[in-house]
Image: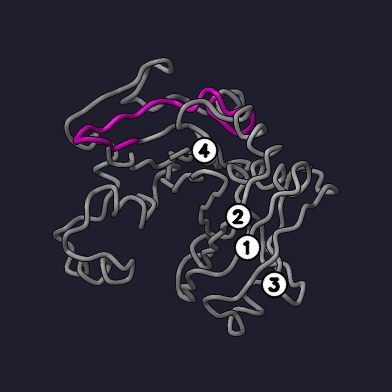
Amino acid sequence: MSRPFVLWLIWQNERTRQRYHVGNLVHHEGKYMFYYEKHAKRRGVIEALKNGYHLHLAFPDVNKVYVSERLFGPFERQLPDRRRPDFQEILRAHGLSNDYTNMDLLRATGGRLATDTYEFVPPIYVYGNEFDFDFYIAGWRYYEGERVLDRLQVGDDVTLQLEPTNEKDPKAVVVLTKQGEKLGYVPAFYSEFMFRLIDESGGTYKANIQFIHPNANPQLKVNVYVHGTLTPTMKKLQRDMVHDMELVVTV
């Protein structure tokens, strides 16, 4: 059986700039499924609803699993228009060949629209005792990123460090260069996993820069890939954190 292709739907509160993992889009065995992320104890749809979120107009039932033979219309409209004269350049910029799927394109571009508060991101994948995920550094514009961008290289190691003194988020995880320069943060919808891995379980990880896009918007400048090993303690914490494929995808 093939592995489900899963993307998390992220909503950003425009006033607070906080982002929440509100839903899950799954493509598996020819069908698309969408359902809300109700089980995340932190930054899921329940917390989002308390902070200004309204359910997507196309998906008004928070308890329903929506199923379709093709990509849901609202999400398809978040893809770049294939008629754009620069469409081939978009594919090349994201390392996609002409046999890409809609899910490939959503993952690569995030389905971001200038007038929209939604984006798609890849999940954390867990397989056996190992895990991996990648993310674009959050808060890039506010820290040392631009000053040191010319020195950063693909493959550079970075350190993920807890920041318990952070008043807005005591579970914040900072991204630092080898020299200790602060580039920004792990996005909040991933940070609890890393917080628990570092603080509570003693699990190990390696993080390095996967992509650098100097001319991109700040939220898409630098992508970090994380791969690590879970201890038995973290495996138990993971089971406490997730339900089915929602917060972490186990394969």
Above/below status of 131 relative to 174: above
Q: Which of pointers 3 and 1 lies earlier in the amino acid sequence?
A: 3
Q: Hey, what amino acid is under mark 3?
A: Thr
Q: Residue at x 68, y 38 (%)?
A: 232
Task: Give the extent of the magenta segment.
Answer: 26-45
Q: CA distance from mark 3 to mark 4?
A: 27 Å
Q: Secondary structure at mark 4?
A: strand
Above/below status of 65 relative to 236: above
Q: Are marks 1 and 4 in contact (CB under 8 Å)?
A: no
Place of residue 190 in the rendered image (x, y in percent of width and height, measured from the top left): 59, 45
Q: How many marks?
A: 4
Above/below status of 54 relative to 155: above
Crowding at dot 1, Cα within 10 Å, few <14 / some 14-19 / many 20+, comes out as: some
Q: Are marks 3 and 4 in contact (CB under 8 Å)?
A: no
Q: Which residue is mark 4?
A: 248
Q: Hey, what amino acid is under mark 4?
A: Val
Q: Which of pointers 3 and 2 lies earlier in the amino acid sequence?
A: 3
Q: Indicate yes or no whether the magenta region holds residue 128.
A: no
Q: Are marks 2 and 4 in contact (CB under 8 Å)?
A: no
Q: Secondary structure at mark 1?
A: strand
Q: Which of pointers 1 and 2 lies earlier in the amino acid sequence?
A: 1
Q: Residue at x 41, y 45 (%)?
A: 120
Q: Disc number at residue 228? A: 2
Q: Are marks 1 and 2 in contact (CB under 8 Å)?
A: yes
Q: Residue furthest right?
A: 165
Q: Disc number at residue 206? A: 1
* Residue 170 lies in quadrant: top right
Q: Hey, what amino acid is under mark 1?
A: Lys
Q: Which residue is mark 3?
A: 177
Give the label, 3 or 1, closer to the camera.
Answer: 1
